[in-house]
Amino acid sequence: MTKAFKGHIALFVAQIIYALNYSIAKGLMPNFVSPVALVFMRILGAGLLFWVLSLFVKTQKVEKKDMKRMALLALFGVVINQLFFIYGLSITTPINSSIIMISNPILVFIFTLFLLKERITLIKLSGLSLAVIGALIILSYRGNFEIGSDTIVGDIMTLINSTSWAIFTVMVKPIMMKYNTATAMRWMFLFGSLYILPIGFTETLHTNWEGFTSHAIFALCFVVIATTFFAYFLNIYGLQELSPNTVSAYIYLQPFFASLFAVMMGQDKLSPTKLLSGILIILGLFLINRKPKKIKA
């Protein structure tokens, strides 16, 4: 099994976790915990798990200049990303949030042109277009996309989140080529924990822990352990072996998996249109990952 194939498996599993999160964590916020408190617990909880993990796996010494870069990356990939996503989701509609997040691979596509000088081919551009169309088709079943005065703040926050994650995905690539996943993530989440501490500590203390049901406790554990710790680890591992464009494009599998799980649980029905959207997304990912043939001299 090649390293690239392992990277694809990691990204595939990460999207399954994200898709499951929509159903499992539904109702957790704001019924049991506030948006800021949830972000606080996600970052501190995952940060603790990354440091525990570093006790059992080999880590590397980080150079001073790279430590500064990791501190900056933590701001984009851990704090701004999570704060604006959670807060944006709490004051906009799920369908608005899902469709705005489609912008992420497009932003990554643009940033790689300027920051990494990555060569963009017609095949990759076609693959991205197919994936976008497939995601939009399946998201059209979930509701109406409407931007108005009631959702505009949440929509802008979601767009900031998408942009922040795109910047992180592109900028973290050189770091991941130099350090292993455990080394990079433990430091970035440590910096993230320091950033979020003055923002979310007080609000977390005021959380009504006695009002938590067994499902809410399970959902919170899933969000911290699976959606944050495991999903971040898998995404960053995938980024070590694959390009930022490939990693970001996997986001288009999330709405397809979410619909698939809804069908499996009897909450939705499978239709030819949904199957078509899945085929378009998978075909798009295939084209994005297809390497151009070398021309023989």
Image (cartoon, rainbow, N blue to C red):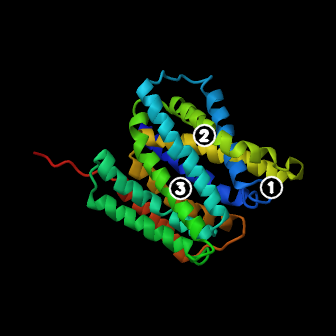
Q: Do residues under tags 3 and 2 come within 8 Å of each other at their CB atoms?
A: no
User: Is the residue marked by circle 3 packed among few (<14), some (14-19), or many (20+) residues within 10 Å?
Assistant: many
Q: Which residue is mark 1?
A: 32
User: Is the residue marked by circle 1 packed among few (<14), some (14-19), or many (20+) residues within 10 Å?
Assistant: some
Residue 129 relative to residue 215: left or right: left
| Amino acid found under the numbered disc labelled 1 | Phe
Disc 3 or 1, which lies upstream in sequence? Answer: 1
- The residues tagged by marks 3 and 2 sit, at their Cα atoms, a distance apart of 16 Å
| Amino acid found under the numbered disc labelled 3 | Asn
Q: Secondary structure at mark 3?
A: helix
| Nearest-to-viewer mark from 1 and 2 | 2
Locate the C terminus and report the quarter of the image it occupies.
top left
> Residue at image x 67%, y 62%?
90
Q: Which residue is mark 2?
A: 195
How far across and down, in percent of the image, does residue 51 sit?
Answer: 63, 28
| Nearest-to-viewer mark from 3 and 2 | 2
**Number of marks in picture:** 3
Residue furthest out toward the left: 297
Q: Secondary structure at mark 1?
A: loop
Disc 3 or 2, which lies upstream in sequence? Answer: 3
Q: Secondary structure at mark 2?
A: helix
| Amino acid found under the numbered disc labelled 2 | Tyr
- The residues tagged by marks 1 and 2 sit, at their Cα atoms, a distance apart of 24 Å
> Residue at image x 46%, y 46%?
168
Q: Nearer the viewer, residue 23 or 262?
A: 23
Disc 1 or 2, which lies upstream in sequence? Answer: 1
- The image shows residue 55, relative to residue 145, as above or below, that is above
Q: Which residue is mark 3?
A: 161
